[in-house]
Amino acid sequence: MVASPYEILDPRFSALIIGHALPERLYTGCRWSEGPVYVPAAKSLLWSDIPNDRVMRYDETDGSVSVFEHPCGYHNGHTIDTEGRVIACEHGGRRVSRLEHDGRWVALVDRVDGKRLNSPNDVVVKSDGTIWFTDPTYGIDSDYEGHAAESEIGACHLYRFDPKTAVTTAIVTDMVRPNGLAFSRDETVLYVADTGATHFPDVAPVIRAYDVAASGDRVANGRVFATSPAGFFDGFRVDRLGNIWTSSNGAVLTYAPDGTLIGRIPIPEIVSNVTFGGPKRNRLYITAQTSLYAIFLKVSG
């Protein structure tokens, strides 16, 4: 009898999983896998192999893996905008860029108040088209994931970029190293991970929640949503029921909207990020250290 691939910590988790569905390793051979994004028009998943300065592509139609872009400016996080274009966080270029439909990468934002960004890390696009991204220093801390440099801003914030006005605004300024981020389904709550313990051991590895103002351009009431029981929360995504699926050390963790840890999917590597994909958005793609994994779920993203 095959052992369950899940750890059910709360009955609510049972309604989200397929009991016999196993995690599949789709590819291995990266140095550090990050930033997965599902591209529906291409029936494929893109993800970053940051130290190798390349973007990888998994073709869901035949299971093949290829190099999509190399060099790529040390991409980290990706997302899709409202027109189906890929948005990328570039450590090397210290910018947020967009892949146009004609194949050109164009820079969207690389400076705030005349100062270069640190190294944009993760990104989401709100339904109004604004681009929200985090800007810690991981891409300038050394030459491993970018180019070693001093921070011109002198701080790490989460920003909102409005493509219509080209205005970039600091939205969250009370975190040490803001990292992964996601909105609740109704966009009334913004979730942000803080991985500041990589630089300051006394910083708790948390996901914080912020209420989004009705105007959509401010947040308030920051509070701790969850504290990681192992390693860091890095990247995460929200399913259609409001549950958060997040990375941690050696597992994907699932949190209910009330902040309760309801289940774990053990993975034999440090998990960095997750995203939902597939035609029904019910396949959870998982980037972890050297590999790409996936597992089918009952719930969609």
Image (cartoon, rainbow, N blue to C red):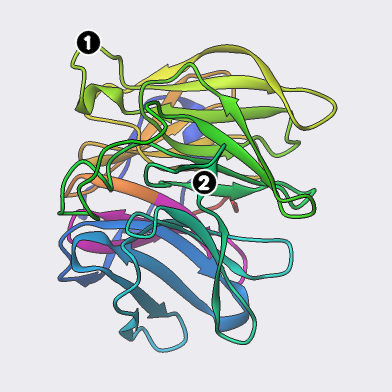
- Quadrant where the N terminus is found in the figure: bottom left
**Residue type, numbered disc 2:** Arg
Residue 278, placed above or below residue 222? below
Residue 173, placed above or below residue 268? above
Horizontally, residue 256 falls left or right of residue 29, namely right
Question: Can you tell which quarter of the image residue 53 is in?
Answer: bottom left
Asked whether the viewer can see residue 4, the reply is no
What is the CA distance from the residue labelled 1 to the residue labelled 2? 30 Å
| Label 1 residue SS | loop
Q: Can you give x and y, in whole percent of width and height, for residue 170 in the image? A: 59, 30
| Label 2 residue SS | strand
Question: Can you tell which quarter of the image residue 154 is in?
Answer: top left
- Residue at position x 21%, y 55% in the image: 2
Horizontally, residue 147 falls left or right of residue 82, namely left
Span of residues in magenta: 274-296
Where does label 2 land, which residue? 111
**Residue type, numbered disc 1:** Asp
- Residue at position x 16%, y 46% in the image: 142
Q: Can you give x and y, in whole percent of width and height, for residue 232 in the image? A: 28, 30
Q: Residue furthest right?
A: 215
Residue 147 is tagged as none
Q: Can you give x and y, in whole percent of width and height, for residue 205 in the image? A: 31, 21
Horizontally, residue 144 falls left or right of residue 192, namely left
Where does label 1 land, which residue? 202
- Magenta segment, principal secondary structure? strand
| Local crowd size for mark 1, using a 10 Å CA cut-off: few (<14), some (14–19), many (≥20) | few
Return the disc, 1 or 2, that comes first in the chain's sequence: 2
